[in-house]
Amino acid sequence: MMTFFSTPRGPLQFYNSSKITIALVIMSSCIFATTSGYDTALINGINIMPSYSATLRLTTATKSLNSAASFLGWAVVSTFMGPVVDRIGRRTGVLVSVFLKFIGIALMTSAQGVGMFVAGRMILGAGNGTSSIAASTWLAETLPPSYRAFGLSFIFTVYYVGALLAAGVTYATASYTSSWSWRLPCLIQALFSVLCFFILFFVPESPRWLAHQGRLEDALISIASTHSNSNITDPVAIQQHRDIVDMIELERASGNQMTYAEIFRTPNSRRRLLLVISIAVLAMSSGNNIVSYYLGEMLDKAGITSETTQLQINIILTAWCLVIACLGTWLVNILGRKTMCLISVAGMIVFLYLVGAFTKLYGNGGGNTSGIYGTVATIFLFQGSYAIGITPLTILYAPEVLNFSIRSNGMAAWTFSITCGGLFSVFVWPFALEAIGYKTYLINATWNVVQFVFVAYFWIETKGLTLEQIDAKFENLNSRTLDGVEAEKQMGNGTGVTIITDGTKKIVEAEHP
């Protein structure tokens, strides 16, 4: 299947500025997370609305099903979309996701019962899952190294932009007496996909995908559009092109296949997969989904039962998380991925224990105003701890630690892990809150301790490295014949790229142009 538009640059690209191209690539990729953030806050908001429950005749089980249906769609596409994105291209994969979202949103908005709403959310989830595979892979492979960390971390930072918009929209429509109180917020979600569709006409395809397809000249044009203001004779663009082609040829020579089986074939690939799954688990099982989907129930337990007050808290909490996530995006390239993750998880452990303790002491109609305020404050601090580290790392770390031959399929595994964590949290937590109350938070906080230990022991730092340097670091760590620092030096000084494959050292000379 041909890639979306045959040109390496966007078919309507009439400018030569790399900064504009980079901004548009980041913007189009960010729409995935903005849609996801909007969708999460949308469900949180309409779950509070009596008209939503009344129109669809919801019970605790069907409300959970409606919330979780999006993750079911993610799960379905994760089983086959990785190879599809490898075949049709990264940018075309984003286009496919846009059309899936249009269909899903139309069904949600016009839903007359639970079945129709669930179908719409599953298709919307399929679109989001496709975006998560295609957009993250596309961005990691297209952006220059100096912009990659910002671009990938910013993707999930703007999650809160969508969430804030949804929180504001649901607050504004909550006073509507008809079903449009929840239908209109569903419909507005389509605006993000409309914007993404038009941006795709002006942005390039992944140069690494083009090189793998044998379109070497097109790959150079794509690199130049993001590295050298479309100047294909620029030394930086030429050197980056050579590094990419050399690395892809090495992967081919090593027998790497772009299949799901490849991500399990070697110890190196399995180690990368373990790290990818770990960030997905962190993103979905740290306790944040309790707040994201069931803030109303949490506030009920804390003693705040007013619908208006809950919606107001939802808006303020989302704005708070956006500010903190922006701070985390700035810090992640200064402190490093591993350090930021450890800081984030440590904060979540402390504050989730406090949420449980305060809910036990002051919740369930206890009437202690100071205690209720304390509970709300710890919820804010917990979400801030999540936003400062896990939010920017959710999309940043996974595609960085994957090499080209397994990147899209590895992101499909990431998507599947996200869906499993999401399904568990969205289905289980409302019943847990109903059955054991504050103990739910204590159990989740204890799980976060396990996650802290895992990150401290297993994670590998990728700060400041190109994708090819990260590949060399993994190969050298796996072979134990060179340490990661030496590999970085060899790749950074322009004298050559050291790759260890199956115990054999291979040197690819990277001549200066």
Image: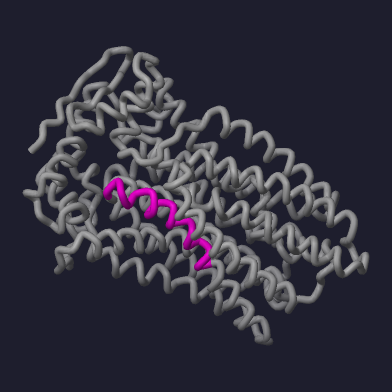
| Vertical relation: 486 (above or below) 331 | above
Colour convention: one colour
Instruction: Indicate the quadrant where residue 498 lies.
Output: top left
33 falls in the magenta region: no
Q: Can you see residue 245?
A: yes
SS assignment for the magenta stretch, majority: helix
Instruction: Indicate the quadrant where residue 192 lies.
Output: bottom left
Q: Nearer the viewer, residue 214 or 116?
A: 214
Instruction: Indicate the quadrant where residue 369 lies.
Output: bottom right
Q: Nearer the viewer, residue 369 or 407?
A: 369
Write the residue at 64% across / 45% down: 285
The span picked out in magenta is 144-162
101 left or right, relative to 497:
right
| Vertical relation: 15 (above or below) 453 | below
Write the residue at 7% across / 38% down: 513
Write the residue at 75% across / 64% down: 376
Instruction: Please identify the residue farthest to the right as the structure is shown.
Output: 366
The spot of residue 399 in percent (x, y) is: 39, 42
Write the residue at 56% across / 47% down: 419
The spot of residue 429 in percent (x, y) is: 73, 51
Question: Disc count in the image?
Answer: 0
The spot of residue 95 in percent (x, y) is: 32, 59
75 left or right, relative to 436:
left
271 left or right, relative to 226:
right
| Vertical relation: 271 (above or below) 148 | above
Q: Nearer the viewer, residue 492 or 454?
A: 492
The spot of residue 15 in percent (x, y) is: 15, 67
Q: Can you see residue 123?
A: no
